[in-house]
Amino acid sequence: MIEGHAAIEPPPGVPVWDVDPYDPQTLADPDAYYAELRAKGPFVYIPRYSVLACGRHQETQEVFSDWERFVSSRGVGLQDFKLETPWRSPSIILEVDPPAHSRTRKVMSRVLSPKVANALREQFLVAANKLVDELLEKDSFEAIAELAEVYPTNVFPEAMGLREVNRRFLIDYGAMVFNALGPDNDLRRNAMAMGPEIVPWITRQCKRENLRQEGFGAEIYAAADAGEISEDEAGMLVRSLLSAGVDTTVTGIGSALWCLATNPGEYEKLKENPKLLRPAFEEVLRFTSPVHSFCRTADRDTEVSGVEIVAGTKILCVLGAANSDETRWPDAGRFDVNRRPTGHLAMGSGVHGCVGQNLARAEVGAVLTAIVNKVDKIKLNGPARWRPNNAIHALDTMPLTFTPR
Ligand code: HEM
């Protein structure tokens, strides 16, 4: 056993690469690691963690979306739930396979449908306009603390129907969940240390009585009333919203601001043609990959691109590397708002593809619309710093100035 999964031998012909994908410096600035991973072949064997890793688009998509051979029920991090007990009870949507997955997924797809997300657009835009107006009053502001973290923690708990909001706990819980997917390093240990304070609070917010009668939370409990899921399962699905719905959009907004601040010419194109907003956010997702890597576990002996993979192998699917694969996207290292990056893996692929993506697009779309309508220039006032996390590629700090249009 190593990092909670079975140790494996390197498969014949697969390069052995002594790299630490979870080194904080690599996590903060991963481009060279992504490029080398792709250059080495369809898979590499990383002895430090006894895993296979893939970063070319083709294999990453194949492994990530083939739930029959590469399961999620054994954990989407390094730990194999078949061999070691996870830190919390597994998610009943992310960490299960069909047919169990299909039942809970059906409920969540309905609760977070495109229609539901569309109905929230107006209220999201009002909140975004207000926040951008406030930031325009300041000479300079901290874009992560004052915008990227503020906006989702205002609109998302409201849309969920949470009665009590603790911004810090919501953000830190996301960081815990995602750091938990990595090895037993400082990032994971520091995140886990927050558990005793945060987890009981999160567990309480998932209960029916702590959710208002309108909102996603109540919709999930309505599915329990209709007999589709049990009361306990409803609480677990509300927990999934709190696990996956905050940190990801915080990251998406921060990364969008970074792309626009560091590519002023692309921002000018958005101002000239706001119709580009939607594809531009897809390009932000491709270019920055908020979820940089998730794992799958081979549930049987199999083969991908001629590489033999034995049952029990943990495979690190490096979505960030796949999204910058030049063979899929020419000039992949350029942020281009005119690109149509269909097929990027930032929201996953296949049966587990992000069930909150309509909502994420509505939230970030509202923020970008408010900015494009009101802000002439987005100026970076100092270096942007990244916050290493075992599964998320997110900014920590970024000083910005907005000048009015
Ligand atoms: C920019 C924002 C977001 C990004 C980049 C993102 C990314 C992802 C990715 C990569 C997956 C696939 C995981 C896998 O296959 O193992 C996923 C699944 C999921 N996401 Fe998101 N997500 C975002 C926003 C959201 C939001 C706002 C919510 C909730 C409202 C959400 C809830 C979920 C859930 C519950 C799953 C599991 C779906 C399943 O297993 O069927 N996500 N997300």
Image (tube, rainbow, N blue to C red):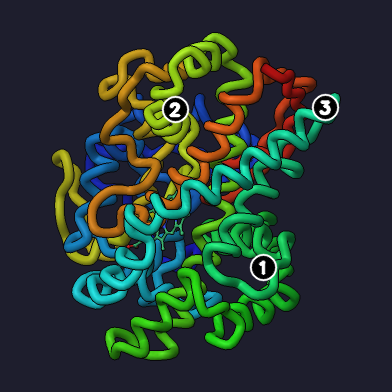
For mark 1, give the secondary structure.
Answer: helix
Camera-side residue of 359 and 92: 359
Q: Answer whether residue 261 is visible to the viewer in this image.
A: yes
| Residue that numbered label 3 is attached to | 140
Residue beneath label 1, please?
A: 192
- What residue do we see at 39% from left, 41% from top? 346
Frontmost residue, 278 versus 244: 278
Name the residue at 60% across, 47% down.
250
Contact check, label 3 and label 2, Cβ < 8 Å: no
Residue 46 in the figure: left or right of residue 106: right
In the rendered image, the vertical position of residue 225 relative to residue 34, given as above or below? below
Label 2: which residue? 277
Q: Amino acid at mark 1?
A: Met
In this rendering, position of residue 195 left or right of residue 283: right
Q: Position of residue 8 (x, y in %)?
A: 34, 58
Mark pair 1, 2: CA separation: 37 Å
| Dot 1 or dot 2, earlier in sequence | 1
Whichever of labels 3 and 2 marks the residue nearer the N terminus, that label is 3
Residue 153 at x, y percent in the picture: 64, 56
Q: Nearer the viewer, residue 80 or 274?
A: 274
Q: Residues within 10 Å of mark 3 (few under 14, many from 20)?
A: some
Q: What amino acid type is highlighted by mark number 2?
A: Leu
Residue projecting furthest to the top:
265
Q: Is mark 1 within 8 Å of ligand 1?
A: no
Under mark 3, the amino acid is Ser
Q: CA distance from mark 3 to mark 2?
A: 24 Å
Q: Going 59% across and 33% down the picture, which residue do you hit?
A: 370
Q: Tell me: 121 left or right of 144.
A: left
Q: Nearer the viewer, mark 1 or mark 3?
A: 3
Residue 69: horizontal and vertical position, in percent? 18, 60
> Horizontal and vertical percent for residue 21?
52, 42
Query: Dot 3 lies on which element?
Result: loop
